[in-house]
Amino acid sequence: MSAPPSDPVSQADGPFALLSTPDPAPAHAFALRLGDGLALRLRERHHVDALAELLATEHEHLAPSFGWAQRPGRAEAERQVAQGLERFGQGRGWHADLCEHGRVVGAMWLHDLQRRGGSTEVGYWLRRDAQGRGLVTRAMRALHRHFFEGRGLGRVCLAIEPGHARSEAVARRLGYAPEAVLRGAHMNVSGRPVDLAFYGLLREDWDGPGADAGPVPLPRFALRVDDDLQLGLLEREDAEALHALIDRNRAHLRPWMPWAGDQDLDATRGFLEGRALPALARGEGVDGGIWWRGRLVGAAGIHSWSQRPRRGSVGYWLGADAQGRGIATRVTRALLAKAFDDLGTERVDLRAAVGNAPSRAVADRLGMRFEGVLRRELPVAAGYADMAVYAFSVAEWRARTG
């Protein structure tokens, strides 16, 4: 499954290299990078306790505006995280932490995200000490590019309770037009029906990102590996692109991954909707597409992640033309860091057929310990192959990475 090496990775770009430019998202985050020091980190299951602490700290500040802020605590934080991941899995939106230079300063979320040409509604809040600096306005301007160019939406809107001066000022600064006032459509924190004013921006009225905005950001929540390489969370709308990549590489993948031999588009959709996205929502693993220099070249993830014992497996596959560039090694290293340094995993293994030399070389380059061979364990195109097992314990990972 290997190809002749080309564009080899230099020592400076090796598996334990640092990013050459600062990341505005917290470490190991699946995030939308917005530029200007801002990022949106998708909330995952293991963020519940940190969110509960933040909501408790900001309780008095948020309670006058949000009904859910009347009940701070872990149960509310868990509800918000679960709701956001459910929306993400269904393709209807998300809940994310707004971060400035890696620090969580608030939150943003989407209601009713529609497909290309449709619309979405954005909600948000800021910590008390983050107000008055234009953070929401800056984040929204960057999100316009994500919505209109990345996702192809036709409209973005804000729903504001009349009299909320700060939010009305945000809408005016962004050029949103008043659309309608729905009478008695919203229940305020006192349980009383109040009006809800909608402000919207159409794609044709958007004035663009500005001359210095640079290339369009990857329109998805992604783990940044390095300047050229990202692991982006796979979504429902990726089925066709992922299937096309598999279809172009059937002969290349089939010897070690027999599922690639006859997988059709419906099976690819079934993988995304029935396995990858539910596993993310339940906190049982992550599956991402590998984007190298803006191009989808493969997939990788942490699979079979369990709470007790806290362990999982890393796996990946690459298209033939992406081989020999160090991509698999760098992505696997980023996934190991995610597992050990973010998820608190105790053990992570990498399993490969004994004859799959490129995959075994990835484990060797990373310094994973060879634990042995499980005989006739792995289904392959020719039947069943012996499977080599490599692993890191958390202690070995700490010793390796410092």
Image (spheres, rainbow, N blue to C red):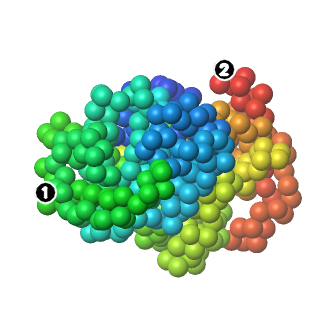
The amino acid beneath tag 2 is: Gly
Residue sitting nearer the eye, 72 or 262: 72
Residue at left offset 49%, top offset 41%: 63
Q: Quadrant of residue 317?
A: bottom right
Residue at left offset 84%, top offset 51%: 373
Residue at left offset 76%, top offset 72%: 383
Whether residue 9 appears in this view of the structure is: no
The amino acid beneath tag 1 is: Asp
The residue where tag 2 is placed is: 402
Residue at left offset 13%, top offset 49%: 207
Residue 194 numbered mark, or none = none
Q: Which of the marked residues, 2 or 1, is nearer the chain's N terminus? A: 1
Secondary structure under tag 2 reads: loop
Left or right side of 205 for 91: right
Tell me the crowding category of disc 1: few under 14, some 14 to 19, or many 20 or more residues within 10 angstroms, Cα based: few
Residue 205 numbered mark, or none = 1
